[in-house]
Image: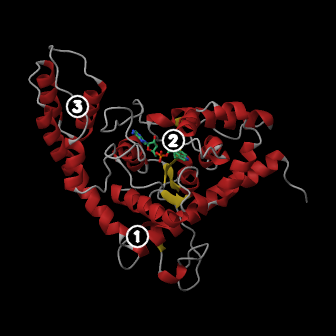
Amino acid sequence: MLRDKSSRIKGGLLLSQNTLHCPIFKFSNQQIIKPKPLLSSQSMDTVVSGIRSTGNLHLGNYFGAVKNFIRMQEINNCFFFIADYHSLTTHPDASLLKKNVRQVLAEYLACGLDPEKSTIYVQSDIPETAELYLLLNMHAYLGELERATTFKEKARKHPDNINAGLLTYPVLMAADILIHKASKVPVGKDQEQHLEMTRQFGNRFNRMYNVNFFPEPVAYNFGEQLVKIPGLDGTGKMGKSEGEGNAIFLADKQDILKKKIMRSVSDSGPTEANSAKPESIKNLFTLLSVVSKSETFNFFEEAYNNCSIRYGDLKKQLAEDMEIFVAPIRTKIEEIAADDQYLNKALEMGKEKAHTSSSKTVKEVRELMGIQYR
Ligand code: TYM
């Protein structure tokens, strides 16, 4: 395994300290071995997804994205990255970037992403993504970018920082996906529109250059509806920057978890049997549905329907079940975040594998666009 002290990796690949920074991995006798995927990537779907390095991962990131990453890496050719460039559109603080990138990486690995099965890398380690972004920008139009919901939301929330990176966020996202010619993109519900725009940019490129080069990637959740995990403040989705107490982080300690859940928004309870749930109560039930046993969920559902429910009891149970879910991940995060050598090795390995795929795509795109002058 990548983490054990001999640094042995499945598939006969050996990583040792002195080979770490080489563009191709070498054994000490100078025999050159290129990293091999475990299964033939030709027969597998290509999958791409990423998470911005804007802080710790929360329950929404886990159930909307990471949970599927872990399932998909068993059966697909997967690229999972840390979207550090995207984080600069809203979080430009240079002194926090390294810490945040390494934290997301540690959390990916703690959740079960395996650098031997997936290509795990940092967005800025692959300059070809930035090049493809630039080229796609030539065929992305102001009107469509201004209409994107996330752009409008962010511009409304931060009128003092409506930068060009924010406007062209969907183009960079399209470049992330198209650079590996992915067909499946595991994401939460909030990313649906960005996927639609990715298809639009890819199809436009195909039409303009009269080719069938980019596939049409879809937002993917194993045939189920895309997930939206609500926050604890009674409205909207769980988010990293939605305000104090809205999000449950995978790294949260038990006392913090409990405090957040006990303080979550609820009301005085139903007064009529079988009445519709207000949004804040629906949210608590959604959280129960992802971390508690079905018997627990059904117990509180029945109590709600016959008006005997006590939200204090529901929250206490939710806090206990949340701790059972989060505790093993939290322990792993702490262990992996302290293992600098492992994190560095994982980053180098991912960079190498991602580069092989991205450089091929950009070379072909340049040719198709006529950028070839010798
Ligand atoms: P980010 O960091 O905002 O979110 C990362 C992933 O977490 C999902 N997510 C949620 N899912 C369900 N419920 C929630 N409350 C919730 N909050 C977040 C998001 O849908 C996402 O899947 N733009 C992307 C990052 C990105 C990307 C890409 C993704 C950049 N390039 C290419 C896929 C492919 C984003 O939303 O990051």
Residue type indicated by callout 3: Ser
Measure the alpha-carbon separation of dots 2 and 3.
Answer: 34 Å
Measure the alpha-carbon separation of dots 3 and 1.
Answer: 46 Å
| Contact? badges 3 and 1 (CB < 8 Å) | no
**Residue 110 shows in the view:** yes
Measure the alpha-carbon separation of dots 1 and 2.
Answer: 26 Å
Q: Which residue was labeled with disc 3?
A: 266
Measuring from the top left, give residue 231's x and y in whole percent. 33, 38
Say if disc 2 is inside 8 Å of ligand 1.
yes
Front residue of this view, candidates 32 and 131: 131
Residue type indicated by callout 1: Leu
Say if disc 3 is inside 8 Å of ligand 1.
no
What's the residue at 40%, 57% (across, down)?
108
Q: Which residue was labeled with disc 2?
A: 185
Tell me the quarter of the picture where residue 217 sits.
top right
User: Tag 3 or tag 2, which sits nearer the N-term?
Assistant: 2
